[in-house]
Image (tube, grey):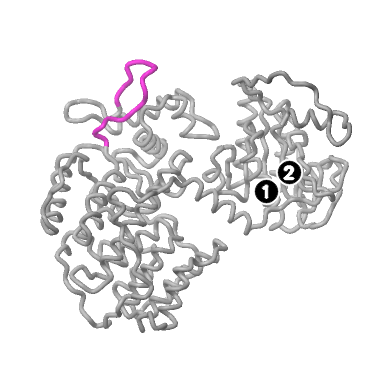
């Protein structure tokens, strides 16, 4: 880039610039900080050139116009600042929008705050930090506010920014209440789709906005790019395919009794299932007991997490070394159950980290520093052997922990987990400052148990249903809860994928007529999977097939309505397989079952 810029400044002779002779070039490992980290695209000129405004040089940029358009301008700025290669030292705070950006963007430059007063407090703390750590004074602090500020809060921002000294602080906010306190600020009309004057740059620009549909496309791509590849390996190759579209499920008469299954006693009862997920996808659970009483789901979103009494779930896990049996279908099923029970009895004393839902650790309080301690426990379990600096950064990418904070939380975790029967602490002490941080190998995790159950059961086909349903019973909601730290995102995506695999397998085996037919269990599996990922169209297709087999046309309409609502919210089209199945089941094509 530097050589291209140099060439552009050279005199042109003929058709090209006369370049000076170059003997060699040296690239060093030492990086030079970006000289203008606050540069960001504000719009485009009439000639089509992008115009970058150095936000670090202005105290405020105010936006007039429709609130939707103001939000789109702020979103455009936030995404570019969050990914720009020269903005690595910038702190960006979003207010009134961008709640999902801190988790989606890998650079960890963006913090979302629900209220402007929270951002004001954080700004004051940032200025105090800069006073105590002069080497951070050059790092810009940018506030992007899409909602109108209270007049008093706007005055406070103006007062603090005026006293920021050497720290570059900039506020981008609606003009309505802030203009009186920033009389010299540039004002741009966010709704104007034609050139307008930008006095600070001495030119006219068309303001850049990021429309909501484009924003959804970008965030969807970021979610996908953050997911690890999931090739079907080992037991996961045994996840069944969907039924062929020409072989739709055969309808059973509504009054036909459900055939008893040999593993009824080993799977969760419908009463337990209803108690655990009563507020998540209620149509699925209602259909289990009273299909005629179904109603279309409301358009409002469902709760992000289902609450569950921890006491209703078994909290022990098998050891990885449990042997497998070589017998037939029945012996494999019975042997698996026996291995699980033996391992559970052996590990009753060991602490367990639960991440298949809100993060929990038995013995750690949910108040005070408890939530930070359990997240630290999860980090140590999934990423053992890290240094103090790495752990501090992972625990708070925006404001990394200090070494003293880390040590204090480790002490709290050590006291909470205690020791094994031999007196060895479950959080071992380090013998030197160079030793890595880790947990005792005896500490367990529900995700490890989920994998053990699922991978042992999948090769058994329908005979593995008891363990598959035990695995799903461990799932309490979205892995790591509603707001995981960035380090946990790749693990979370892996977990969601595997949970969907197990859900689909259970639904596939429980839906058709036969010895394993149990529509209540199939519906409960789908409810669990959709609680984890309510956009998984594979599971909606499973749900539709369940209601088709049940002869429950209203339940089928409920499933179709829900998947359509989810896709409208995401501004996405249905998958072709979903469209085809809906058409077959609702329109009664020759390939479809008539219900």
| Residue 437: in magenta span | yes
State the extent of the magenta-drawn residues as a range.
Answer: 428-443
Residue 447 image-quadrant placement: top left
- Residue reaching furthest to the front: 14
Residue 264 position within the rendered picture, expressed as x and y whole percent measured from the top left = 17, 64
Q: Which element is circle 1 on? A: helix
Determine whether 311 is above or below 461 in the image: above
Residue 439 position within the rendered picture, expressed as x and y whole percent measured from the top left = 31, 30
Badge 2 is on which residue?
41
| Residue toward you, 125 or 173 | 173
On the rendered structure, is 348 left or right of 57?
A: left
- The disc placed on residue 76 is 1
Q: Which element is circle 2 on? A: strand
Q: Main secondary structure of the magenta part?
A: loop
Which residue corresponds to the image point at 59% horizontal and 21% vertical from the top-left? 29
Label 1 neighbour load within 10 Å: few <14, some 14-19, many 20+: many
């Amino acid at each position: 880039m530097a050589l291209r810029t140099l060439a552009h400044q050279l005199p042109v002779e003929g058709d090209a610039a006369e370049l000076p002779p170059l003997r060699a070039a040296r690239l060093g490992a030492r990086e030079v900080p970006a000289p203008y980290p606050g540069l960001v695209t504000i719009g485009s000129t009439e000639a089509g050139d992008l115009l970058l405004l150095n936000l670090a040089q202005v105290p405020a940029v105010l936006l007039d116009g429709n609130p939707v358009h103001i939000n789109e301008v702020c979103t455009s700025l936030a995404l570019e600042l969050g990914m720009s290669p020269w903005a690595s030292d910038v702190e960006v705070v979003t207010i009134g929008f961008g709640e999902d950006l801190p988790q989606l963007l890998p650079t960890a430059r963006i913090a979302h705050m629900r209220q402007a007063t929270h951002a004001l407090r954080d700004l004051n703390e940032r200025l105090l930090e800069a006073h105590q750590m002069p080497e951070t004074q050059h790092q810009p602090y940018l506030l992007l506010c899409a909602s109108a500020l209270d007049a008093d809060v706007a005055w406070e921002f103006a007062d603090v920014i005026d006293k920021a000294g050497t720290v570059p602080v900039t506020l981008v906010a609606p003009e309505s209440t802030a203009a009186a306190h920033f009389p010299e600020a540039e004002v741009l009309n966010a709704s104007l789709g034609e050139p307008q004057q930008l006095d600070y740059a001495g030119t006219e620009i068309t303001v850049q906005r990021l429309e909501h549909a484009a924003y959804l496309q970008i965030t969807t791509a970021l979610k996908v790019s953050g997911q690890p590849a999931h090739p079907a390996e080992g037991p996961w190759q045994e996840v069944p395919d969907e039924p062929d579209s020409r072989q739709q499920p055969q309808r059973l008469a509504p009054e036909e009794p459900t055939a008893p299954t040999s593993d009824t006693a080993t799977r969760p009862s419908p009463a337990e299932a209803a108690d655990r997920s009563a507020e998540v996808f209620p149509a699925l659970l209602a259909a289990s007991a009273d299909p005629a009483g179904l109603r279309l789901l409301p358009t409002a979103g469902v709760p992000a997490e289902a609450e569950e009494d921890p006491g209703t779930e078994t909290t022990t896990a098998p050891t990885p070394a449990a042997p497998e049996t070589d017998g037939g279908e029945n012996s494999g099923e019975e042997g698996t159950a026996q291995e699980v029970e033996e391992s559970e009895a052996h590990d009753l004393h060991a602490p367990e980290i639960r991440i298949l839902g809100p993060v929990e650790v038995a013995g750690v309080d949910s108040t005070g520093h408890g939530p930070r301690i359990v997240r630290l426990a999860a980090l140590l379990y999934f990423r053992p052997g890290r240094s103090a600096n790495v752990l501090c950064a992972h625990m708070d990418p925006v404001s990394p922990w200090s070494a003293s904070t880390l040590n204090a939380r480790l002490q709290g975790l050590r006291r909470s987990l205690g020791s094994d029967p031999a007196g060895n602490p479950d959080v071992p002490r380090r013998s030197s400052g160079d030793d890595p941080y880790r947990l005792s190998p005896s500490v367990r995790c529900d995700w490890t148990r989920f994998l053990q159950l699922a991978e042992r059961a999948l090769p058994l086909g329908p005979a593995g249903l008891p363990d598959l349903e035990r695995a799903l019973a461990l799932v309490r909601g979205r892995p790591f809860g509603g707001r995981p730290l960035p380090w946990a995102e790749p693990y979370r995506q892996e977990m969601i994928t595997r949970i969907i695999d197990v859900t689909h397998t259970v639904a596939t085996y429980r839906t058709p007529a036969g010895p394993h037919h149990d529509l209540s269990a199939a519906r409960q599996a789908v409810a669990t999977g959709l609680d984890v990922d309510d956009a998984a169209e594979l599971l909606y297709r499973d749900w539709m097939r369940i209601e088709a087999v049940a002869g429950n046309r209203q339940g089928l309409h409920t499933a179709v309505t829900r998947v359509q609502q989810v896709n409208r919210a995401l501004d996405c089209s249905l998958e072709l397989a979903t469209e085809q199945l809906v058409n077959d089941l609702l329109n009664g094509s020759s390939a479809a079952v008539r219900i």
